[in-house]
Image (cartoon, coloured by chain):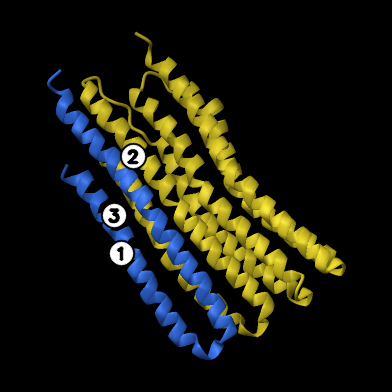
Amino acid sequence: MMQADSFLLISAYLGAALSTGLASISAGIGEGYAAGEASKALAKQPKSGDSLLRTMLISQAVTETGAIFGLVISLLLIFGGAGHITGSWFKVGALFAAGIAMGLGSIGPGFGAGYTGGQACSVISRLPKESNMVTTNMLIGQALAQTDAIFALVVALLLLYSVPNPTAATTLGQFVVKISGFLGASLAIGLGTLGPGMGIGFATGRASNMLGRFPHQRGAVSRTMFLGAAVSESTAIYALVIAFLLIFFS
Amino acid sequence: MEIIGPAIVKAAALLGAGIAMGIGALGPGLGEGFTAGKACEGIARSPENAGLITRTMLIGQAVSESTGIYSLVVALLLIFTA
C-alpha cells in the first residue's frame, strides 16, 4: 500500500499539468485572433500602426491573465502545495481538483477577452481618432470577461489551502464522498465559467466595435453592455455558489 | 464493506451536482452574452429604439436564464437531498 504522500505528489503533478495546459488553449487562440484582426486592420489603415500595435498589445496582455493564473496554480502545486502537507488523504483529491478548476475556468474568459481585443483592433482601423475610447471600453470589457477566471482562481486557492485535515476516524466512504465533492466543485466552476466568459466577451467585443463606428452613442452602448454582461455573469455566480457548497458542505 | 454503498451514491450525487451546474451554465452564459452583443449593435445603429431594444434583450435573457436556474435547482437538490 502506497502512502498518502506519494498519492499527493501524483495528484499535485497531474493537477499542475492540467492547470497550465488547459488554461493556455484559449489564451493562445484569443491572442492569435487579436493579432490577426490587428494585422488585417493594419493592411487597411497603415497610418494608424502605432495605436493599433498599442491596443493589440494591451488586449493580449489582458487575455494572457487566465493563462498566468493557470501557471501560478501550477507552480503552487509543484513547489508550494504538496511538499508541506503530509498524510492528508482529502488533499489527494483537492490538489487535482484545484488544477482542473483553474485550467477549465480559464478557457472561456480567454476566448472572450481575445474576441473583444480583436474586435477593438478591427474597428480602430475604421475610425482611428476614436482609438482611445475604444481601447478604454475594450479594457473594461476584457476585465468583465476575466472575472470568471478570478472565480476559478478563488475556487482553486480554496481547494489548495482550506481543505481540512481528516480525523483519525475518517472512513473510506467519507473519503470517497469528500473527494467527489471537490471534483464536482472543480467541474462546476471550470465548466460553468466557459459560457459566461465567452458570452461576456462577445457582448463587450460587439460593444467596442459599435463604439468605434458610432462614437456618439457611447452612453447607451456602454449601459447596454454592462447590463447584458451582468445578466450573462449570473450563471457563473450560480456555479461559484455550487462550488462553495460542494467544498464546504459535502 | 457495507458502508461503501451509500457513500458511493452520495459521491455520485456530489459529482453530478458539479457536472449539472457546470455544463448547465454553458448555454445560458453564451446565449445571454450573444443577446447582449446584438443589443449593443442594435442600440448603436438605432439609438431612438434604445428602450425597446433593452426591454427585449432583458426578456430574452430572462428566458435564456431559465435553463441555468434549472441546473442550479438540480444541483442544489443533488447536494442536499441525495
Disc marking residue A184: 2
Other-residue count near label 3 (Cα within 10 Å), few / some / many at <14 / 14–19 / ≥20: many
Horizontal arrangement in the rendering, residue A46 relative to residue B21 (left or right): right
Q: Are marks 2 and 3 on the same chain?
A: no
In front of the other: A92 or B17: B17
Which residue in the rendered view is the most extreme toward the top?
A1
Chain A in the picture: what colour?
Answer: yellow
Looking at marks 1 and 3 on the same chain, the residue that comes earlier in the sequence is marked by: 1
Badge 1 amino acid: Ser
Horizontal arrangement in the rendering, residue A164 relative to residue A81 (left or right): left
Q: Is residue A179 visible?
A: yes
Percent across and percent down for residue B75 are 26, 49
In front of the other: B25 or B76: B25
Percent across and percent down for residue A119 are 65, 65
Percent across and percent down for residue A126 are 75, 74
Q: Residue at x 51, y 25 (%)?
A: A13
Helix, strand or loop under label 1: helix
Name the subunit of mark 3. Answer: B
Disc marking residue B47: none
- Label 2 and label 3: CA atoms lie apart by 13 Å
Q: Are marks 1 and 3 on the same chain?
A: yes
Q: Are marks 2 and 1 on the same chain?
A: no
Badge 2 amino acid: Gly
Q: Is residue A250 visible?
A: no
Q: Residue at x 48, y 46 (%)?
A: A105
Chain B in the picture: what colour?
Answer: blue
Quadrant hosting residue A156: top left
Q: Residue at x 83, y 69 (%)?
A: A45
- The answer to whether A218 is drawn above or below residue B75 in the figure is below
- Residue behind mark 1: B66
Name the subunit of mark 1. Answer: B
